[in-house]
Amino acid sequence: MNVRQIGILIVLLLVPFLLGPGESWKSRRHTMVTEQLIARGISDERVLDAMRTVRRHEFIPEDYRDFSYDDSPVPIGHGQTISQPYIVALMTELLGLQPHHRLFELGTGSGYQAAVASLLVEEVYTIEILTPLAQRARTVLGALGYDNVHVRAGDGWAGWPEAAPFDRIILTAAATDLPQSLLDQLKPGGRLIMPLGAKGAVQELVLVTRSISGEAHVKELLPVRFVPVTRNP
């Protein structure tokens, strides 16, 4: 390695420190979008802009924050994880979210998926069964100004009847069956996306479209691995 190459290497190593924390996170976000999303075929510019905008590291516990923009899930405590950025972007893109839509989410987790979706729809209603996670997500979302996200602690399998029907529904945890209770809260022509399969096994990401007559049409997309849906006893 010559002197010039050594100099370039030193500059690259120092960039995060020279730019400061905020700019460093922004740079990582843009790299994430380019290398993990666009390179894998995510093309919806609204989704890409949302992924560039939402500060993913703010939704991750301090101990794991350095991994915020890695191409992998990250622990958020209580045995739960935040999905890898590509999966978040893919599920968001497949839903085809529009500005007038109302979205229901089962499994708030860190609140990151809700934050991304909130930039693309009118309202997000999200339920997390683990109260500490729901409280933390509500706090972070509020502090960051995501005022169109409504967070509730509870069993999301029952949905949010008083806010239904929804244009779109997303499950960020795996279930072994299609949730009829949620399909009943999905508008005709609406879409639901979820991982379908057993705990500990490879699941299938499926996109469910509800026809005008109310029938559910299921399309299998790709194998995934999510934490299972947690239900109240």
Image (cartoon, rainbow, N blue to C red):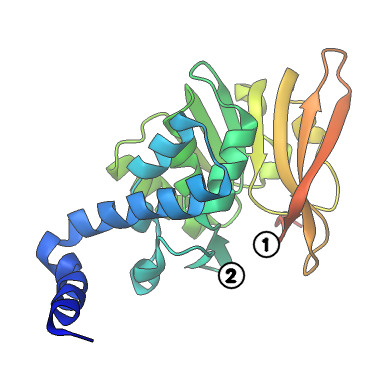
Query: Please, is residue 208 above or below residue 7 in the view?
Result: above
Residue holding disc 2: 79
Residue holding disc 1: 227
Q: Amino acid at mark 1?
A: Val
Does 221 sit left or right of 65 as displayed?
right
Q: Residue furthest bottom?
A: 1
Does 7 sit left or right of 103 as displayed?
left
Visible residue check, residue 153? no
Which type of secondary structure does the marked residue at label 1 adopt?
Answer: loop
Query: Please, is residue 74 above or below residue 22 in the view?
Result: below
Q: Write the residue at 27% across / 54% down.
A: 27
Query: Please, is residue 96 above or below residue 73 in the view?
Result: above
Quarter location, residue 66? bottom left
Q: Write the residue at 79% across / 34% down.
A: 181
Quadrant of the drawing holding the C terminus:
bottom right
Which type of secondary structure does the marked residue at label 2 adopt?
Answer: loop
Q: Which mark is first along the chain, 1 or 2?
A: 2
Q: Marks 2/1: CA distance? A: 9 Å
Residue 187 position in % (x across, y down): 72, 18
Q: Are marks 2 and 1 in contact (CB under 8 Å)?
A: yes
Query: Please, is residue 179 above or below residue 195 in the view?
Result: above
Q: Amino acid at mark 2?
A: Gly
Q: Nearer the viewer, mark 2 or mark 1?
A: 1
